[in-house]
Image (spheres, grey):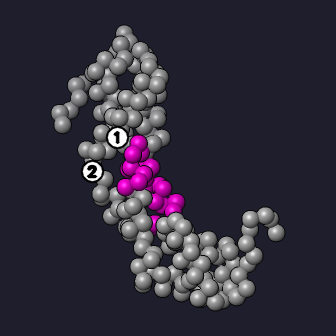
């Protein structure tokens, strides 16, 4: 046995023991049902005991995937786009319908503001006078953070209109003025 690993449960079919283990994990950190089930199964509890324990925890409102998803969206929204947050919800076992409801709380205007703030921070950290380099650096970073291509294009147009890049190269895609808010 590796150091720090617990011994498997003495009674893997014991629903009460699985329930107590679930509550202990939930007290330490909020988790989705899928995450908690995966952990309890890894520890060695039997699947029927895990399902019964999780059903009981959900019935007593200790386990609520929708509340978990809303809280995660609220915590993770800074500096991240909708797609990245949605991917994180999926990786934590939140079903698509619940993830969609949680993502509804994201305001499209605030997502644009988050993208603008991140883009300006990138430009401050790595100033460039070359349009192509600016587009690659800022656009790539915003894309990796889960912002949509429409938001990325708008932010890039705004940055270029503000004079963040003064290259002599012309790119008609970025010569249009930013859309009014």
Q: Residue furthest right?
A: 1
Image-quadrant location for residue 48: bottom right
Q: Secondary structure at mark 1?
A: helix
Q: Which mark is residue 58?
A: none
Question: Is label 2 in contact with label 1 (beta carbons under 8 Å)?
Answer: no
Does any portion of residue 132 appear in the rendered image?
no
Q: Quadrant of the N terminus?
A: bottom right
Q: What residue is pinned by disc 1?
A: 114
Image-quadrant location for residue 73: bottom left
Label 2 crowding class (10 Å Cα cut-off): few <14, some 14-19, many 20+?
few
Pick the residue in front: 82 or 168. Answer: 82
Q: Quadrant of the C terminus?
A: top left
Residue 145 in picture, x, y percent from top left: 45, 42
Q: What residue is pinned by disc 2?
A: 107
Q: Earlier in the sequence, mark 2 or mark 1?
A: 2
**Residue at the image position 45 percent from the left and 75 percent from the top:** 63
Residue 121 in picture, x, y percent from top left: 41, 30
Pick the residue in front: 72 or 94. Answer: 72
Q: Residue furthest top?
A: 168
């Amino acid at each position: 046995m590796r150091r720090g690993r617990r011994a498997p449960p003495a009674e893997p079919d014991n629903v009460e023991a699985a329930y107590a283990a679930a509550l202990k994990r939930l007290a330490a950190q909020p988790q989705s049902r899928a995450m908690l089930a995966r952990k309890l199964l890894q520890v060695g509890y039997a699947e029927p005991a895990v399902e019964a324990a999780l059903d009981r925890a959900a019935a007593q409102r200790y386990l609520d995937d929708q509340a978990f998803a809303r809280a995660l969206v609220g915590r993770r929204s800074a500096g991240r786009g909708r797609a990245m947050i949605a991917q994180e919800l999926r990786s934590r076992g939140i079903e698509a319908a619940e993830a969609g409801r949680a993502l509804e709380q994201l305001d499209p205007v605030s997502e644009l503001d988050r993208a603008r703030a991140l883009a300006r921070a990138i430009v401050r950290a790595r100033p460039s006078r070359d349009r192509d380099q600016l587009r690659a650096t800022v656009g790539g970073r915003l894309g990796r953070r889960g912002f949509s291509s429409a938001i990325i294009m708008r932010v890039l147009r705004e940055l270029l209109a503000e004079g963040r890049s003064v290259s002599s190269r012309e790119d008609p895609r970025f010569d249009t003025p930013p859309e009014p808010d």
